Image: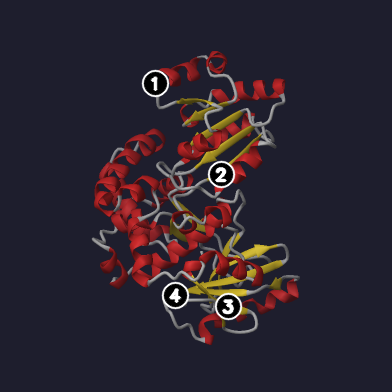
Amino acid sequence: MLSRTLATSIQRISANFPVVMLTGARQVGKTTLLQMCAGGDRRYVTLDDMEARSLAQHDPALFLQTWPPPVLIDEIQYAPQLFSAIKIHVDRSQTNGAFWLTGSQKFEMMRGITESLAGRIAIIDLLGFSQAELLGRANVSRPFLPGADWVMQARQSASGKTASLMDIYQRIWLGAYPRLNEQGPAARNVFYRSYIQTYIQRDVQDVLKVSDQLAFNRFLGAVAARTGQLLNYASLARDVDIDNKTAKAWLSVLETSGLVYLLQPYHRNLSKRLVKTPKLYFLDTGLAAYLTKWPDAASLEAGSQAGAMLETWLFAEILKSYWHNGLEAPFYYYRDTNQREIDLLIESGDSLYPVEFKKTASPSQNASNSFAALEPLGRLGKTVGSGAVVCFVERDIPLSAQVTAIPVAYL
C-alpha cells in the first residue's frame, strides 16, 4: 500500500482541531488514508450502511453513543443531521481529533458545516495518487514553488531519474485512482465505466434528480473534451443540447464533487485588461481520456488533445503538491486582451511565480516570453518571482536569470 503525502498533515491538523473532514471525489482513497492514519485506534462506521445511516438521520445523539469518539464516520453527507450533534459533543468535551469525517459531496455538507461546525472543523482535500506518491516520494513531496530551494530539493528527490514522453502519457491515460493503479491498465475500461454509472446513480441523482442520464453522460464527455480550455457555457450547453442554466448547475456539481477545477484569472487591479472567464481542468486525466474515447496512451499522445491533457495533468500534479500537504492552492492563470497568456500563476505573499507547461524536451529562451506581461504588476506592489517552464528536459536548465526549465520528473 503506497504512502500518501497527506498522512503527515492529517495527524498535525487533527492535533489542533476537534473535527477533521477529508473530502474528494469517490475512489480517491479517503477512507483508506484515514484508516491508515488511525492505525486501529479509532472506531469506524460508514453511512453507506443503511442501518447506520437511518440511525444517524433519525437519532443523531444515539448514533454518537453507539459510535463514540474517537471515531471515523465515512460518507457523512448522507446524514447532515449529525453536524449539530457533533457540535454539542465537541463543545462539551473540548477534545481535539475526536471526529474524522469523509465525504464525497461538498454541496450537501458545506451547508451543515457552515451552520454547525464553523471554527471547529478543518477541511482537507484529497485527489488521486500524485506522481511523487506513485514513485515512493510521498514523504518528501513539497508544495511546488519555482525557485532555487524547491529545484534543488526536487533534483535530489528525483535521484537522476527521468520520465519519458510515453511514460507520462501512459500515466495520463491510466489516471490516478488508487484502485486502478493497483489493478493495472487491463482493468481501466471496466473501472471507468462502472465509476461513471456509480457516480451518476449515487451522486448526481441525489442532488440534481437528472431525468435524462444520457444527456448528463454527453455533458461529462463535453466537459472532458474542454479540459485545459477557457470555459464557455454557451458552447458547452449548445453541444449537449441543454440550456445555459442547466449547464451551470451540472458543472457546479462536477466541481463540488471533486471532478473538475475552475482556475480563476488573476485580476488584481487589472480587471479591465484581463479575460474574466475561468479555465476548466478535469482533475483526473484518465477519466477525461476515457470520456473522450482515447483507446491507448500512444493515440492520446499523437492526438488533438495531447497538449491539453499534458497541461491538465501537470496542473493537477502541482495542485496535489499543495492539497496533499494540507495547504490551500493560491493559483490563477493570466490572459489579457492582447492574447498574452501564462498557464499558471502561483501567489505567495507579495510575489507571483509564473509557470508555463510545454510538450518539448528542448525549450527555447522564448518559451517564457509571456512572463513579460507581468511587468506592470511591479507598479502595483507585486513582485514577479522565479518562473518555470515545466517540460521534458532531463534535468533543470536555466533559461534566463529568472526562469528555469524544470523536468516533469521533478513533480
Q: Which residue position is annotated with label 4?
A: 392
Of 166 and 289, nearer the camera is 166
Q: CA distance from mark 4 to mark 1?
A: 49 Å
Q: Which residue position is annotated with label 1?
A: 50
Label 3 sits on a secondary structure element that is strand
Q: Is residue 357 above or below residue 43?
A: below
Q: CA distance from mark 4 to mark 3?
A: 13 Å
On the image, which quarter does residue 302 sit in?
A: bottom left
Tell me the amino acid under the disc marked 1: Met
Q: Which residue position is annotated with label 2?
A: 7
Label 1 sits on a secondary structure element that is helix
Q: Position of residue 21 (x, y in %)?
A: 56, 36
Horizontal relation, residue 204 to residue 212: left or right: right
User: Along the polypeptide, which appears first: circle 2 or circle 3?
Assistant: 2
User: Along the polypeptide, which appears first: circle 4 or circle 3?
Assistant: 4
Label 4 Cα crowd, 10 Å radius (few <14 / some 14-19 / many 20+): many
Q: CA distance from mark 2 to mark 1?
A: 29 Å
Q: CA distance from mark 2 to mark 4?
A: 30 Å
Q: What residue appears at the point 64 percent right and 71 percent down from the top-left corner?
A: 147
Tell us which disc is closer to us: 3 or 1. Answer: 3
Q: Which residue position is annotated with label 3?
A: 404
Tell me the amino acid under the disc marked 2: Ala
